[in-house]
Amino acid sequence: MNNEQTIIITGGAGFIGSHVVRLFVKKYPNYKIINLDALTYAGNLENLKDIEGATNYVFEKVNILDVAELDRVFETYHPDGVIHLAAESHVDRSIVSPLDFVYTNVVGTVNLLNAAKKHWFDTDPTLNAKRFYHVSTDEVYGALGDTGFFTEETAYDPHSPYSASKASSDHFVRAYHDTYGLPVVLTNCSNNYGPNHFPEKLIPLMINNVIHKKPLPVYGDGLYTRDWLFVKDHATAIDAVYHKGANGETYNIGGFNEWKNIDLVKLLCKLADEKLGREDGESEQLITYVKDRPGHDRRYAIDATKINKELGWKPSVTFEEGLSQTIDWYLQNTDWLNHVTSGAYQNYYAEQYAEKS
Ligand code: NAD
Ligand code: TYD
């Protein structure tokens, strides 16, 4: 691959996107990284403060529903690649507002595919060295029973409006490959955790509530199982797939790291009590069983053999290490957490970029 290329990373101000942007900006000084993000409630430029002055980094506040703006960005930068992470990502929100998920995750993805198809075919009909990388989730495969794993061949069976919208976007990406010859690659990853995670998802919500001694809401019987991957390991997997993945292929990404929610929350409480100098068992008292999520998938588990065998990727940290680092990060970044929970982080763009726009 070209070692002086321009890549648009969508959703780069979000949780996973910000780790991907940082990795690429730092690891590839000869690349130009365009962070394209609408800055919804989940987009936070404070996540990228440390690299915002880098000469190979540009931020574009653009909504992927705005076709004219996508055209402008493609015409301005002539990207060689797109790494597409922008999405509505929270299952509970999708149950309340499914259409938002259809717009961003389905229509937004098709807008981006159209922009890539139009600009790449116009400038280089051979599509030489172009790549459209779609980042997706294991939730498209539905739910597992007590045994078995999702492989790349598992049939799609989404249950939530979120997973249905991601499944639809995956189908469109493959359809653009099969129909128009667009060079694409896809990954389906398990649940991520780590620094900069918006505190509406399980792990950061529990950390925030432990810090503030608020109830820890465990849905249903707490025996739902997820396969957790440290976000920085997801970013290195994305790096591997972007550079070495085969055209048209799909790779599952996961940590071989299954936890029942209740066991995870208890481990989190134990680690947090040690770090906060609280008595062992103190935070566990905050656990409260609450009403279950409708359509709640019982178990997710990824078979990540293909990416390991073909691209040599594997996770770098154990769950205990990653969770401990994550709790430390939240304890050391109380400003970030306070800005996010108060909404103050949304002023950052206006203040920081005022004279640039
Ligand atoms: P996130 O919600 O933290 O961030 C999403 C980002 O997309 C935000 O910066 C937001 O501003 C931006 N965005 C939303 N709508 C947009 C629009 N219309 N136009 C432009 N930008 C928009 O999400 P995340 O957890 O970082 O997930 C990133 C991607 O990875 C998503 O595609 C998600 O489906 C996928 N994924 C997430 C997980 C996980 O555990 N979080 C696991 C597997 C796959
Ligand atoms: P979540 O972080 O929302 O990720 P996803 O639904 O995409 O897997 O939830 C992870 C698991 O934790 C899921 O089984 C739902 C459960 N959960 C709770 O028990 N309590 C909570 O407050 C949240 C947000 C999630």
Image (cartoon, grey):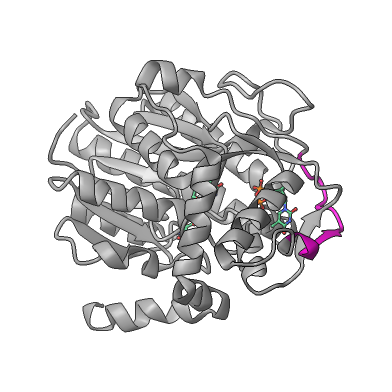
Q: How many marks?
A: 0
| Residue at left offset 37%, top offset 68% | 45
| Residue at left offset 27%, top offset 55% | 34
Q: Nearer the viewer, residue 13 or 133?
A: 13
> Image check: 302 left or right of 126?
right
| Residue at left offset 33%, top offset 63% | 48
Residue 107, above or below 140: below
> Image check: 42 left or right of 155?
left
Q: Inspect the magenta stretch and tell me whether residue 146 lies in it.
A: no
Instruction: Give residue 171's position: percent from left, percent from top.
Output: 55, 32
Residue 36, above or below 152: below
Instruction: Give residue 335's position: percent from left, percent from top.
Output: 45, 77
| Residue at left offset 77%, top offset 65% | 286
Q: Nearer the viewer, residue 132 or 140?
A: 140
> Image check: 206 left or right of 130?
right
Q: Is residue 333 visible?
A: yes
Name the quadrant containing residue 129.
top left
Q: Nearer the viewer, residue 217 or 84?
A: 217
Q: Which residues are magenta?
A: 284-297
The quarter of the picture where the C terminus appears is bottom left
Instruction: Give residue 348's position: percent from left, percent from top.
Output: 38, 78
The quarter of the picture where the N terminus appears is top left
Instruction: Give residue 35's position: percent from left, percent from top.
Output: 31, 57
Q: Is residue 194 visible?
A: no
Residue 245, above or below 163: above
Spot the residue most to the top: 309
